Image (spheres, helix red, strand yellow):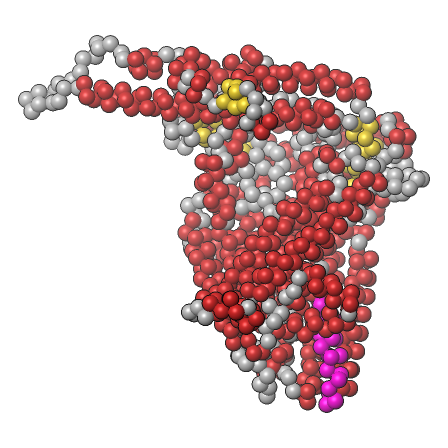
């Protein structure tokens, strides 16, 4: 790519045109697929309209092929905060910023740079390069580049202004988000995780004394203790339960198929036994008093294990070996073995838990739940201990589901060692990855490679458009595939680093992945040599390396034009069409939906975006666009189109499809890093322009002009660095912590009179605690009363018997019943009523009580108080390791047509294994469908 020269521009232009045509066609295909399936497959393209609770649902888009587009564009982006959190909204805001930046860049560069480069100059060999830097080659025309300098100054100031404005807006929005009643009352907002705590603070009493300065006081303290042996037993039991569910579902599927085959044979045998009707005896019928066949007797029998054994003999059931790798050891029946293992593990876990309460060793991590949100933020910022490397790492906004328990037992020295090793491994990985990237770089300019490698002449001599496809379409596709593998490896390195929260692992992944993409996706691709060679050049002659990059940058623009087209058109179209989820939904039913739990995940769980891998790719495109904004103005137009397509696609996805996990919410923590990385593109552009000007100082006709231009660019680099540092230092504290001026004002308005409030007063803390308890109790009583009334009307037990839907807030919502039922039959059936009648009555009662359900949900959201699992007062085990309190997962068995599942449930329950067949049904073909969450 870096070897693209004016002599090879014609081929490069053809490659660019090929990429535009191919990706435009692909975009049309993806849009056609989207518009054709959008109204038919709500589960894929609009699950947010019916799966979450009503208050979290999105309105349906208007019908029609293109009516969805103006509806998405004109919808309020701020609604995304309520539906998917601040992270999702700020991601969309970042795309909107880039749309405006490149729109302004396009207007300014096309109005100034394009005429300056094109009028009266003929240095390029194709029309594609006539508007670029390459077209101006005459040393006497050096003054023309004064226009470029002026434009670079204007656009740099504009980018800095946009970053400053958006950071101020983000800080304001984040503060409103943190102070909102729906968030500030969350236990997550008031919990601090502290690691590397010394043994002198290894008791709850000592920690309460340590945190006695915290405003409002401390409500609860959790100490993380050694549970290594218990964790092994717990994880082993989880695996055995999963294996048992698979084995039970398989044996029921085989039994259903065996019954279906017997029934088919019976019908066939019966049809052969019937006398053929004659013309004079059309009323001939078989006798009703014939004895039942064996198969008919089978159907008349009650479901039992004996019946299951007849349909699926023990020798035909799933078996496995208990030795290493499942190859060695004794061959055992999977169901029997897993049942016995679960019973054994349940007993061992109960014994280990009782022992754990007495002998658990403190491992240096504590969770402190403060009474006030501002207290938690103050605790997270203070200097906590008087010795080195003790209690340095503190994490605010901690959620139980966000904890990486494996990373809580490392001391400070071990953690810092892991950080160093993980980053050394990241750098080493970048070095190794340079070789395949260099090969792809050679493909992008295969015509030049053919001249040096004669054995590749057959590629260059191939009939058109094969060479153009290899140069224009294949390299970006291969580069994207190569980069898709890297996040998996980098995430593992971030996890090894010892980060104790999943959300922060994604933040670490963002930093590593952007660095990788910047080096391999831009710098090394431009240099078209391995990183090892580039590092050797930097060590031997740093000035020459920068000059080499500056020289190659203008000529490599064609490849990056193609790359921008590929990512902008095909990438945005692919996100909108949801091809991967579409395939996963249908094929997942066959491969990943064999058990009820798997079928539930495939059917009801909505997808989510991983900003740790998504944002680096978009940031790389922004870096490329900013770096080439003056060298080749066409890239500004392509970047504008690219981010416009991405904005529409992701706005649609966040409003209609995605559901971001509330536990992984960082409150927009990715946004400051994303906008800060925009400066990288400005630095590359300015430094390369300065080098290009200084390299022309040796030419006599343009010596002084080029020198002055280079000095102006160096000055702009210095000003940009100054602005960057100033912005980071100004906004850094405000992007993480809550300012006391806002927090105390909010408390005074809510709890004090005329601003008179003493946060250290025992009376204030007691009043605060009693008020929270009263509101929480009243709300729970209201919900319980309404829920009992609703459930009593349909005579269904709480939990698995109901059809439920869950959303971000964790609220259960009764799903729609059968719309074909008769309203006259809405009276409550008796407990002995058939299952079909109960389901019909459930649907009718649900419609009659919909208003009461909505009232219960409104009560759930009153005064910012949500369910106790995520709100106000946490469960006593909230920040204990799951192995210390989580019960054995209920073995979820699908209810088969023969009702053999009831016999299996009784069999497992008698053995001491929790099991249920509620909420999941297996049809006659062996397919599993679910109607409620796991029991």
In magenta stretch: residue 697: yes
In magenta stretch: residue 180: no
Name which residue lies at 81% across and 39% down: 414
Name which residue lies at 51% across and 66% down: 455
Pick the residue in front: 651 or 867: 651
- Residue 159 percent coordinates (x, y): 71, 66
The image quadrant where one finds the C terminus is: top right
Name which residue lies at 45% across and 40% down: 587
The residue stretch that appears in magenta = 684-702
Give above or below for 568 relative to 44. below
Asked if one can make out residue 490 in the rendered structure from this viewpoint, the answer is yes
Give above or below for 905 relative to 44. above
Pick the residue in front: 871 or 779: 871
Name which residue lies at 51% across and 17% down: 905
- Residue 818 percent coordinates (x, y): 42, 30
Q: Identify the image quadrant of residue 811.
A: top right
């Amino acid at each position: 790519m870096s070897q693209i020269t004016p002599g090879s521009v014609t081929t490069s232009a053809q490659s660019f045109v090929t990429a535009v045509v191919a990706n435009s066609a692909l975009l049309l295909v993806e849009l056609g697929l989207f518009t054709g399936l959008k109204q038919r497959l709500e589960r894929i393209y609009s699950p947010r309209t019916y799966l979450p609770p009503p208050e979290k649902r999105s309105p349906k888009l208007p019908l029609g092929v293109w009516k969805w587009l103006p509806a998405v564009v004109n919808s309020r982006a701020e609604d995304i905060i309520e539906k998917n959190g601040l992270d999702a909204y700020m991601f969309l805001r970042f795309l909107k910023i880039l749309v405006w930046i490149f729109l302004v860049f396009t207007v300014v560069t096309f109005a100034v740079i394009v005429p300056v480069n094109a009028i009266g100059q003929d240095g390029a060999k194709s029309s594609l390069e006539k508007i670029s830097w390459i077209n101006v080659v005459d040393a006497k025309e050096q003054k023309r580049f004064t226009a470029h300098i002026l434009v670079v100054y204007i656009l740099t100031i504009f980018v800095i202004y946009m970053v400053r404005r958006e950071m101020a807006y983000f800080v304001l929005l984040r503060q409103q988000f943190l102070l909102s009643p729906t968030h500030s009352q969350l236990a997550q907002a008031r919990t601090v995780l502290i690691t590397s705590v010394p043994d002198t603070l290894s008791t709850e009493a000592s920690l309460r004394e340590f945190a006695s300065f915290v405003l409002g006081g401390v409500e609860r303290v959790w100490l993380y203790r050694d549970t290594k042996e218990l964790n092994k037993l717990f994880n082993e039991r989880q695996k055995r339960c999963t294996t048992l569910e698979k084995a039970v579902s398989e044996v029921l599927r085989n039994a259903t198929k065996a019954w279906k085959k017997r029934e088919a044979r019976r019908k066939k045998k019966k049809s052969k036994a019937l006398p053929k009707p004659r013309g004079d005896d059309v009323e001939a019928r078989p006798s009703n008093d014939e004895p039942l066949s064996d198969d008919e007797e089978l159907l008349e029998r009650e479901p039992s294990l004996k019946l299951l054994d007849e349909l699926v003999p023990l020798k035909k059931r799933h078996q496995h070996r208990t030795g290493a790798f499942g190859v060695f050891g004794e061959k055992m029946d999977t169901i029997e073995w897993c049942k016995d293992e679960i019973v054994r593990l349940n007993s061992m876990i109960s014994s280990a838990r009782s022992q754990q309460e007495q002998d658990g060793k403190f491992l240096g991590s504590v969770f402190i739940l403060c009474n006030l949100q501002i207290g938690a933020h103050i605790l997270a910022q203070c200097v906590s201990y008087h010795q080195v490397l003790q209690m340095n790492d503190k994490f605010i906004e901690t959620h139980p589901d966000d904890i990486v328990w494996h990373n809580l037992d490392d001391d400070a020295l071990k953690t810092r060692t892991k950080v160093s090793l993980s980053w050394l491994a990241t750098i080493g990985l970048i070095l190794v990855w340079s070789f395949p990237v260099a090969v792809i770089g050679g493909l992008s300019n295969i015509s030049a490679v053919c001249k040096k490698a004669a054995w590749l002449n057959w590629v260059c001599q191939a009939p058109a458009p094969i060479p153009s496809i290899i140069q224009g379409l294949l390299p970006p596709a291969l580069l994207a595939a190569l980069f898709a593998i890297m996040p998996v490896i980098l995430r593992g390195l971030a996890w090894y680093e010892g980060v104790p929260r999943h959300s922060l692992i994604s933040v670490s992944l963002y930093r590593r992945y952007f660095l990788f993409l910047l080096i391999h996706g831009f710098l090394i691709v431009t240099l078209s040599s391995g990183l090892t060679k580039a590092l050797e050049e930097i060590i031997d002659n740093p000035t020459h390396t920068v000059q080499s990059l500056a020289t190659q940058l203008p000529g490599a623009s064609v490849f990056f034009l193609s790359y921008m087209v590929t990512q902008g058109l095909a990438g945005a179209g692919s996100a909108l069409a949801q091809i991967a989820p579409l395939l996963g939904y249908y094929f997942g039913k066959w491969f990943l939906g064999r058990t009820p739990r798997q079928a539930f995940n495939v059917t009801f769980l909505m997808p989510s975006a991983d900003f740790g891998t998504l944002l680096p790719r978009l940031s790389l495109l922004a870096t490329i666009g900013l770096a080439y904004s003056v060298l080749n103005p066409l890239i500004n137009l392509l970047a504008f189109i690219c981010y416009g397509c991405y904005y529409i696609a992701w706005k649609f996805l966040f409003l209609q499809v995605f559901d971001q996990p509330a536990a992984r919410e960082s409150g927009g923590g990715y946004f400051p890093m994303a906008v800060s990385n925009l400066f990288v593109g400005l630095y590359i552009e300015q430094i390369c322009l300065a080098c290009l000007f200084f390299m022309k100082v040796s030419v006599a006709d343009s010596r002084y002009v080029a020198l002055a231009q280079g000095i102006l660019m160096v000055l702009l680099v210095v000003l940009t660095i100054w602005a960057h540092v100033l912005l980071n230092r100004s906004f850094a504290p405000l992007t993480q912590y809550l300012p006391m001026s806002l927090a105390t004002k909010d408390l005074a308005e809510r709890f004090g009179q005329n601003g008179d409030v003493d946060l250290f007063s025992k009376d204030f803390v007691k009043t605060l605690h009693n008020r929270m308890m009263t509101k929480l109790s009243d709300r729970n009583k209201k919900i319980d009363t309404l829920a009992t009334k609703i459930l009593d009307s349909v005579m269904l037990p709480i939990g698995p018997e109901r059809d439920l839907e869950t959303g971000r807030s964790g609220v259960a919502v009764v799903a729609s019943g059968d719309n074909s039922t008769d309203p006259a039959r809405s009276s409550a059936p008796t407990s002995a009523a058939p299952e079909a009648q109960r389901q019909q009555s459930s649907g009718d009662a649900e419609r009659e009580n919909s208003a009461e359900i909505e009232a219960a949900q409104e009560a759930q959201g009153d005064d910012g108080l949500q369910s106790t699992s995520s709100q106000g007062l946490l469960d006593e085990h909230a920040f204990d390791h799951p192995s210390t309190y989580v019960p054995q997962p209920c073995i979820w068995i699908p209810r088969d047509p023969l009702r053999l599942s009831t016999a299996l449930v009784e069999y497992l329950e008698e053995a001491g294994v929790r099991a249920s067949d509620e909420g999941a049904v297996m049809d006659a073909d062996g397919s599993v469908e679910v109607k409620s969450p796991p029991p």
